[in-house]
Image: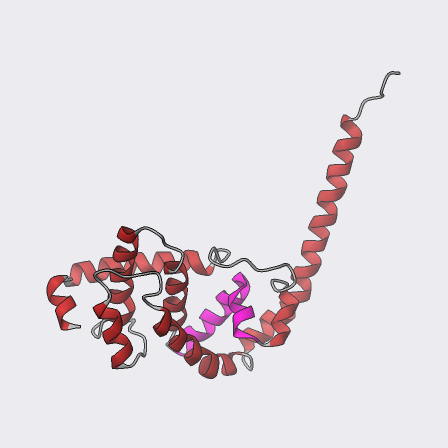
Amino acid sequence: MNGFCKTTPVDLEDTNRIHNAWKSKIHNLIHSPLVWRKLNRQSTNETSLLGESLETVLSQKCGRTAFRDFLKSEFCEENLDFWLACQEFKTLDSPQELTKRAAHIYEEFIRAESPTQVNLDFHTRDNISQNLQHPSSLCFVAAQKKIYSLMENGSFSRFIQSEQYKVLFDAAPKQRGLRKHRKALKIRNTGDRIQHDSKPISL
C-alpha cells in the first residue's frame, strides 16, 4: 500500500478535487438508471420493493435515493457510494480508463486517510493496492461483495423498519398508477394522431 502512495503521490488539493468529482459522479449514478444491468419489467416494478430485497431496492432510482438518505442518517453513505462506483467500474473496457478510475476509487474509498474510507480488512486493501498499476474490471469485486454484505446484514435490516422505507412503500402504488395513466394517455394520443392523419383510399 505504501508503495503505491510513493509512486502516485496525491496532495491535499488533488484529494479534494477527486472527492468533489466523485460526489458529482455518485449523484448521477443515484439518479440514473443502472447502466450495468438489464432488468426485466417485473423486477423493476416498484411493488417488488415489498420483497424487502437490497438487490431490488438498489435496482431502482427511488430505492437508491431512499436507501442512501437512510445511510446518510447513519453516517455511512460511503458504503453505497463505493458499491455504485464499483458497479460502474465493471463496465469499463479501456485499460487507460480502468487505471485512471481505479486510482480514483482507491483515493476516495480505500486509502487509509480518506474521509470516505470504507470498512475493509487489511488483506482486501492490500490486494487492491497491488493491482492498481494494471487493474482489470474485477479489481474491486471482492471489496464490493464485502461492502454489499455489510449493508445487507447491517443497515438494510434497519432501513426496512425505517420511515424512509415506509414512504417508499406507500409511494409504490401511486407511481404505478401514474405510469399506467401516462401510458394510456400516450396510446390515446397516438391513436388520435393516426386517425387524424389517415386519408381515404381511392379505388
For the stretch drawn in magenta, the main secondary structure is helix
Q: Position of residue 9 (x, y in %)?
A: 13, 62
- Colouring scheme applied when the structure was drawn: secondary structure
Q: Position of residue 21 (x, y in %)?
A: 30, 56
The C terminus - image quarter = top right
Which image quadrant for residue 10? bottom left
Circle count: 0
Q: Position of residue 140 (x, y in %)?
A: 33, 68
- Name the residue nearer the viewer: 137 or 105: 137
Which image quadrant for residue 16? bottom left
Residue positioned 26% across, 75% down in the render: 125
- Tell whether 177 sits left or right of 161: right
- Tell whether 115 sits left or right of 56: left
176 to 110, vertically: above or below: above
Residue positioned 54% across, 80% down in the render: 162
Which image quadrant for residue 80? bottom left
- Name the residue nearer the viewer: 124 or 53: 124
Residue positioned 56% across, 69% down in the render: 56
The outermost residue toward the left is: 6
113 to 177, vertically: above or below: below
Residue positioned 45% across, 70% down in the render: 68
Does residue 66 show up magenta in the picture? Answer: yes
Does residue 115 show up magenta in the picture? Answer: no
The outermost residue toward the right is: 203
Q: Position of residue 198 (x, y in %)?
A: 79, 26
The outermost residue toward the top is: 203
- Tell whether 160 sits left or right of 19: right
119 to 104, vertically: above or below: below
- Name the residue nearer the viewer: 17 or 98: 98
Q: Which residues are magenta?
A: 53-74
The N terminus - image quarter = bottom left
